[in-house]
Amino acid sequence: MQPLTLINGSATRTLASSDRGFNFGQGVSTRIKVVAGKAQLWRFHMQALQQGCAALGFPINAVDKLVKRDLGILPKADLSLRVTLTAGVGSNSAATPVEYQPTRVLQIEPYNFVEPPVEGVDLWLCETPLSIHPRLAGIKHLNRLEQVLARSEWRDPHIREGVMFDTQGYVIGATASNIFWVQSGQVYTPDLSQAGVAGVMRAALLERAGQLGIEVHSVRARLADLEAADELFVTNAFDGVMAVKACAQKQYAVGSGTLTQKLRTELAQVLYD
């Protein structure tokens, strides 16, 4: 199929210049991996959208139903589906209109998915910091400039992702992924109460780990904590769980027998729950 954009259910590429997502970044988005017509982690994506809209001041009831109504029936193909919701058309005032009409944008395009390398990936240490903002922490809102600037720091195709820190030097995540590490059999992930994006694959991993009796510790960590880890991995909705083989000068365990591999296998079984 050809790439398709739907705005409020209509096949158009025209967005009003007064849309609050365009003018103020008042909106949220999520990118869904669709394999042979089946959307992965649908429940987590819809929850993230619903919670994000409410946090940004334009609650939407039944996001799931709205998106499904616009989307219709997906072809049995591999697709990238980006869903963006904004507070809709409004004035130039910062105040959210009392009677707002949210804008729904669906971008659908064919996609060739490539499995992450089994030998693991390399990470960059980004210099661009993430701002501390508790009210926006965890939300995938439309202002991603810090991640964009961080991603521009490297061009080496062998480096898959970049670790990002907040302005106080605490590990938050990667430019488009969440971070986990294993030390002495314990699993850790950064505390995202002050900054960062709580991704859907992260949410699925936390849920599945809990079902398996694996505790994941949410902590405020610095680079030294990553350097002391035995295993390191990153997660996102398109790549799943990606083992990290190296970050800066540190080498990590990868492959069979690692806790990273166990979690990757477990998550593969619940992608369509």
Image (spheres, rainbow, N blue to C red):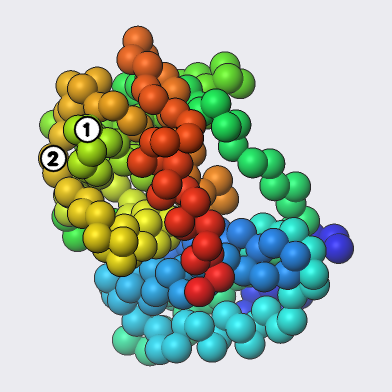
Q: Nearer the viewer, residue 161 or 18?
A: 161
* Number of on-image labels: 2
Q: Is residue 230 visible?
A: yes
Query: Where is residue 80, by image quadrant?
Result: bottom right
Q: Residue furthest front?
A: 257
Mark 2, Cα crowd under 10 Å, few <14 / some 14-19 / many 20+, is some
Q: According to the image, label 1 marks what residue?
A: 183
Residue drawn at x 61%, y 21% as measured from the top left: 157
Reply above or below: 261 against 48: above
Residue 188 on image: x %, y %: 22, 42
SS at badge 2: loop
Residue 98 on image: x %, y %: 32, 86
SS at badge 1: strand
Is 250 positioned to the left or the right of 122 in the image?
left
Which mark is nearer the camera, 2 or 1? 1
Residue drawn at x 39%, y 25% as measured from the top left: 253
Distance in Å between CA atoms under marks 2 and 1: 15 Å
In the image, what residue type sits under mark 2?
Arg
Q: Residue furthest top?
A: 249
Is 221 positioned to the left or the right of 262 in the image?
left
Query: Where is residue 184, by image quadrant?
Result: top left
Residue 265 on image: x %, y %: 49, 51
Q: Nearer the viewer, residue 170 or 93?
A: 170
Q: Residue furthest right?
A: 1
Is 170 positioned to the left or the right of 264 in the image?
left
Q: Nearer the viewer, residue 264 or 241?
A: 264
